[in-house]
Amino acid sequence: MTVSVHIVCPLCLGINRVPNDKLSSGPNCGKCRQSLFGHAPQELSASNYQKVISRNDIPVVVDFWAPWCGPCKAMAPAYEQAAKELEPRIRVAKLNTEQDPSVGSALAIRGIPTLIIFAGGKEVARQSGAMRQGDIVRWVESVL
């Protein structure tokens, strides 16, 4: 029997059941037919954040950032490169705390950039400060 996981589509937010052995073969959403993994961070907002972290069966790493933040902008390319290494085992996402301050406030985000790893809808680790690509990947893999 093949074990499957639920993956939330980054575009239409449809929930897809994907067999584990098909995750790395570029699965598409059953609803909108787009790729479930683009190897780039998924943009989150207050409206989709909870669904993405709670309905994905794979862990989700979220970068809480703001456009005025120099370290956030400096880390953005490294975070995108880390997404290419971590997906599809781990969903990589980012949330603009200036655009959606309620989410950052609810999570007691005090400094940005802050990376939070969620598994099963719950926070399992947090790291503040800009990191390089290799450091991001090592940190995520050490936690999970």
Image: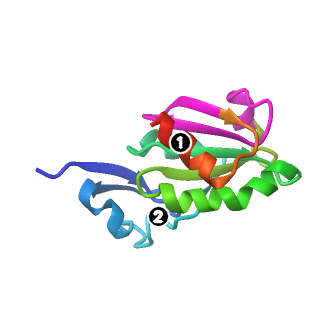
Q: Mark 1 points at which residue?
A: 140
- The colour scheme of the drawn protein is rainbow
Q: Give how far across and how far down residue 68 sits, in percent.
A: 89, 52
Q: Where is residue 50 in the image (x, y as percent from the top left)?
A: 55, 40
The residue positioned farthest toward the left in the image shown: 1
Q: Residue 19 sits in which quadrant?
A: bottom left
Highlighted range, magenta: 102-126
Q: Is residue 143 above or below residue 133?
A: above
95 or 129, nearer to the observer? 129
Looking at the rendered structure, which numbered label has been put on residue 37? Answer: 2
**Residue 111 image point, x, y percent:** 80, 34
Badge 2: how crowded within 10 Å, few (<14), some, or many (20+)?
many
Question: Could one spot residue 13 in this view of the protein?
Answer: yes
Q: Give the percent coordinates (x, y) of residue 120.
A: 42, 34
Q: Position of 111 compared to 58: left or right?
A: right
Residue at figure coordinates x 58%, y 63% from the top left: 40
Among the two numbered marks 2 and 1 on one chain, the one whose residue lies closer to the N terminus: 2
Tag 2 secondary structure? loop
Q: Residue at x 66, y 34 (%)?
A: 127
Q: Alpha carbon of mark 2 to alpha carbon of mark 1: how far?
A: 18 Å
Q: Which amino acid does label 2 sit on?
A: Phe
Q: Does the stretch in magenta take in 112? A: yes
Of residues 5 and 9, the one nearer the viewer is 5
Q: Which residue: 38% across, 43% down?
A: 57
Say which of marks 2 and 1 sits in front: 1
Which of the two residues, 127 or 40, is positioned nearer the viewer here?
127
Magenta-colored stretch includes residue 15: no
Residue occupying the point 43% across, 43% down:
55
